[in-house]
Amino acid sequence: MSTPGPTPPGPPQVRSLNCPGCGASLTVRSFGNAVTIICESCHSVLDAQDPKLKILQQFHAATSEDPPLIPLGSRGTIRGALYEVIGFQRRTIQVEGISYSWHEYVLFNPTKGFRYLTEYDGHWNDISVLRALPDVSAGETALTYLGETYRRFQTADAATAFVLGEFPWQVRVGEVVSFSDYISPPRVISSEGTGKEISWSIGEYLAGRDVWKAFKLPGEPPTPIGIFENQPSPLSASVKSVWSLAGLFFVLLLSLAVGVYWLESDEQIFEQTFEFNTSAGGEASFVTEMFQLKGRTSDVEVTTSAAVDNDWLYVNYALINQDTGHAYDFGREISYYHGSDSDGSWSEGGTTNTVTVPSIPPGNYYLRVEPESDPNRGLIRYVVTVKRDVPQASFFGLAILALFIPAGLITWRSMTFEHLRWAESDYGSPADGSLVSTVGTIVDSFTSGEDE
Amino acid sequence: MTRIFFFVYGLIVLAVVSFAEYRGWSLNRVNEVINVPRSVRDNPGSYRSVYSSYHHYTGGK
């Protein structure tokens, strides 16, 4: 973007002139700062520095073909200063045979000088001229400005396709300049020039609604389409804090686990060895001695250990409250098989099975036990152990998943956003495609976000 | 906003785990039967478990 130096201070001045081409009235808002003026009627590009307004160029276009979203003469407050829209241009690039156009608005303040707004597919940027040269890396793949690294996003030749109003440089329709954009969302630094002279500018992403609010424009701004090169990711800034919180809650969860394992009694209430003769026939079920569950409502863990070897034992249990007649019915199989085949040795199952019965109130209980097995098995010896108030590790495992899965999803969405951003770049992702470098890119993005 | 949401969400996760451990919740499910007669203690065979004759024979590999 070609721009002059600082503007001399002075009150806003508006001068009326007439176009030497068509005689139409011209309004000059930046007065002595304008280098070229475009007649809205005949589209003559006039030399504002010439007292006779020499015609520099004429182009054919209908003003209505591309009306500015912010009308010329509109005034709005940007970064605390009142600016007036004095110029408007459309610029176009060709990429693989497809034209992409964006709009640039020239803003003027008598004391602050010029700044610019750009708009592409509903994405806005507030642009100002760089006062110091950035440090461009070898190969021009990145640059550093005020300690912040910007990565090259695209390089193209942009042609001016349409102009209106006043410009602080010698604008021409059809003029082509080469530009490069380097991004560090939400900022972008652009170089622009013809080779001999390069100007640098810095932009910051603006929400359309902020532009509408600044200029008090009616209606709603255009809805942004896609992801723009320096559009800040809505999630990148959250990724680090969410992972920090996930880590904090993980530590708290570990502390809670230590506390639970320390405080819960894990009290053994009952243990007895039984024998089941499968060939005896008759009624196999029996009841145990009564045992008392004291304290608060808690879980009850029933463990069955059976001497099975390539065999099985199935036990129906009913934990029955003698006082209330409330029973908790469950069954457990203990089976253990092993052997060897062409794949080598194998085994499956085990000789112990544990079930945790949830939320058992205190009271006097007994177990009704009904074992089953292969009728030809013979005698099986098994041990039944009952404990109460046993810590459940499974809840801590689920809690860890519950904490880290959302954090992972937020990270994944952030990565997807960056992937979509860099899919539009001429240079692809700055990451080499590996997960580590991709995560590094995101870390960079939210680190730079924190600096704001 | 995301941070606040995740902070509240993390507190809820911790609270649920604490409550689950305190109340003795379990991921195992059992069948609850009410009003089991006291006579079961004298005649265990009169009780009909929903898991009776539920053979799980696997037979190994």
Image (cartoon, coloured by chain):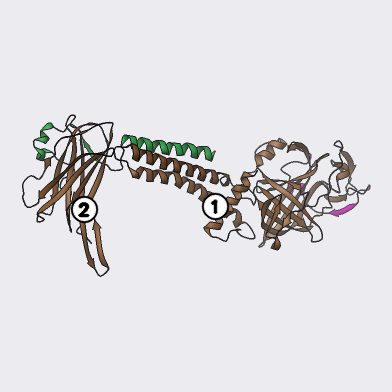
Q: In the image, which residues are magenta?
A: A49-74
A147 magenta-colored:
no
- Left or right? Give the position of B29 relative to A291: right
Label 1 marks a residue whose chain is A
Question: Which chain is the one coloured brown?
Answer: A
Q: Tags 1 and 2 in contact by the CB under 8 Å rule? A: no
**Quarter that holds the C terminus of chain A:** top right
- Find numbered disc 2 in the image and state the secondary structure of the residue it sits on: loop
The answer to which quarter of the image holds residue A338 is bottom left
A177 to A163, vertically: above or below: below
Residue A235 is labelled as none
Q: Main secondary structure of the magenta part?
A: loop
Residue A351 is labelled as 2
The kind of residue on which mark 1 rests is: Met
Indicate the position of residue A279 as horizontal and vertical percent values: 7, 52
- Left or right? Give the position of A147 relative to A347: right
Which residue bears the numbered disc 1?
A: A415
The kind of residue on which mark 2 rests is: Thr
> Residue drawn at (73%, 38%), measured in percent from left and top?
A79
Q: Nearer the viewer, residue A18 or A223?
A: A223
Question: Which chain is the one coloured green?
Answer: B
Within 10 angstroms of label 1, few (less than 14), some, or many (20 or more) residues?
many
Indicate the position of residue A137 as horizontal and vertical percent values: 70, 59
